[in-house]
Amino acid sequence: MNIQAGGDRHVRAREVAAPKSAYMDVRPADRLACAVLLLALAACGGSGSPTSPSLQPLPVVAETPNFRYHYVAGDSVDAAWQEAYHSWAIAKLGVQVPRKIDYYKYRSRQDMGDHTGKYNTNGFADPATFEIHTLWATDNHEVVHIYTALVGRPSDFFNEGIAVALQTDPPAGNLDSVFNGQLVHQACRQYLQLGTLPSLDRVVTTNDFRAISDDVLSYRVAGSFMRFAIDTYGTSRVLEFFRVSSRDDNLSTIKQRFSAAIGVSLENAEAAWTTMLRGA
């Protein structure tokens, strides 16, 4: 079902990299059925403090079993695709979303900023309120933050990484992970060959991840490693790591919690990942 009040190009996979400032804001969160633990995070939102919105929130235009869609006349969303992705993603992650997700679709960054106070971003999620805000007619990144927040919240490297790892197109039968128009494993193989693939020791904490100047590289690296971890060690182990982790864990704590949850050390997982990249 294509819900629209005018023509629009429907983005099937999120292939536009978020800018440097399009990162997560941390907000306080309530527990949700004892599953959401300190997780009110605006995923991929602008890093600066938002300004006061100058416009009222977008109205609800349509509802489907799992979403409420907010947009203006002349805009559109691809609700059929979004419902299909939702079904695939929650089955993949083994989570149940307890309420409908509010999907706010904007026509531009200016439009988003006028309604939310956040101008310098392509999209963000607020897991505490089950909201995503995006420029795209479909979303396979911000909504992942809603799903994984039901389990836990690790550092930004892993939190953004799993969202990139699930940037797939299940309705089309394409389960490859793509970021900014390129398969993440393919991109990281090229980084490895060029000597620009960073050591995980240097990027897995939130501060180190956000300090990387090349945003496309950082998201691809995180997405490739997390896709490898899911495929190799299993989704349940990865989510156990999410459950026991927090956003501000230091490197030592990340290593300890990763090893305990995944069953291998971070160093050994990194070695296996780079071996896979060399042979990809």
Image (spheres, grey):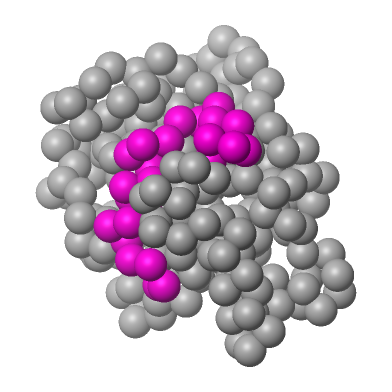
Q: Quadrant of the N terminus?
A: bottom left
Q: Position of residue 268 (x, y in %)?
A: 57, 65
62 vs 117, left or right, is: left
Q: Position of residue 103 (x, y in %)?
A: 34, 40
Q: Position of residue 278 (x, y in %)?
A: 68, 84
Q: Residue at x 69, y 49 (%)?
A: 201
Q: Residue at x 16, y 35 (%)?
A: 99
Q: Quadrant of the C terminus?
A: bottom right
96 vs 103, left or right, is: left
Q: Nearer the viewer, residue 163 or 79?
A: 163
Q: Is residue 171 magenta?
A: no
Q: Is residue 155 in view?
A: no
**Magenta span:** 231-254
Q: Is residue 64 in view?
A: yes
Q: Residue furthest top?
A: 52
3 vs 27, left or right, is: left
Q: Position of residue 203 (x, y in %)?
A: 69, 47
Q: Residue at x 19, y 42 (%)?
A: 97
